[in-house]
Amino acid sequence: MFLIAGPCAIESRDIVMHTAETLKQVCDRLGITLYFKSSYDKANRTSMSERGVGMEKGLQILQEVKSTFSLPILTDVHESWQCAPVAEVADVLQIPAFLSRQTDLLIAAAQTGKVVNVKKGQFMAPWDMRGAIAKIEANRPASQSFSLQDIWLTERGSSFGYGNIVVDMTSLVKMREYGYPVVFDATHAVQQPSSQLGVTGGNRAMVPHLMRAALAVGVDGLFLEVHPNPDEAISDAANQVRLSDIQMILEQAIAIDQITQQFQSAE
């Protein structure tokens, strides 16, 4: 099991560096491979609210994280032209859920040769991800050998009526059939979109419950947005996990993952 974690948005260098240092210390103690995640631009906002530090400054901060803590970096791309410069820093390019069918973006991300993490759109069935897979597979650099580790598929829940997200755990099983690593995004799965007068709400208390359920089904990685003081975060304040809680949450994750692997090896 690997972990994708970090603040939802790059708000400041200090927050990012503090969070990265703490996450690395915890993951080193627990033997978990960490991919540090944070977004330089929260382009998908309900309102004209603060979006982050922007690409140039954001990539500088992520490069500092990478150099200081020897951590691989994952961050979002929203437009095709962003893929090449972001790939100079990031080890994994993430396709946001609302953009998971955007052909030009998927092609541009694939052409960098970096790992591409596609977040399943809230409007998509798990089998719809075959389209995104095909677009990436067909556009990897010809000079680069292809690996089943080059594409990740992330489940973050599905829209259920207005202002609610639910998770169909069978989606994890179905997407694993495609042969690529499957990640469960436990923090976005508890979102309540646009539920607070133009601001996305959520219920972070439910994060450990859904995480444990997904691990019991079987996943390859976890996605957790983490912040030193989530209630003051500029985005996803209601569903980010407190940095002070991360070790306890990950200890639970390891315990359940180990049991699940025992059952899967016996199947």
Image: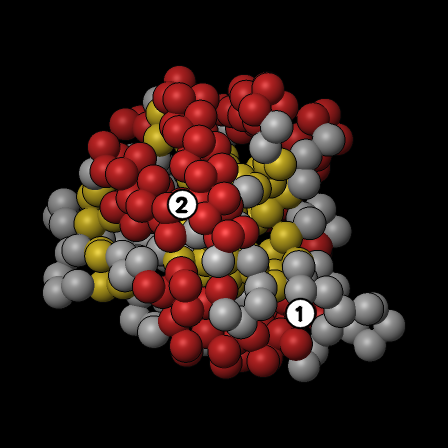
For the view shown, which residue lies furthest in the front direction? 266
For numbered disc 2, what is the local secondary structure?
A: helix
Q: Residue 74, relative to residue 28: is it above or below?
A: below
Say how the picture is coloured.
Answer: secondary structure
For numbered disc 1, what is the local secondary structure?
A: helix
Tell me, yes or no, if residue 176 can be seen here.
yes
Residue 172 % position (x, y) = 40, 60
Q: Nearer the viewer, residue 26 or 37?
A: 26
Circle 1 sits on which residue?
110
Q: Nearer the viewer, residue 32 or 231?
A: 32
Residue 256 % position (x, y) = 41, 37
The Cα atoms of the two marked residues, 2 and 1, are separated by 28 Å
Tell me, yes or no, if residue 186 can be seen here.
no
Residue 242 in which image quadrant = top left
Residue type at the position of mark 1: Ala
Binning the other alpha carbons within 10 Å of mark 2 as few (below 14), some (14 to 19) or many (20 upward) gives many
> Which dot marks residue 215?
2
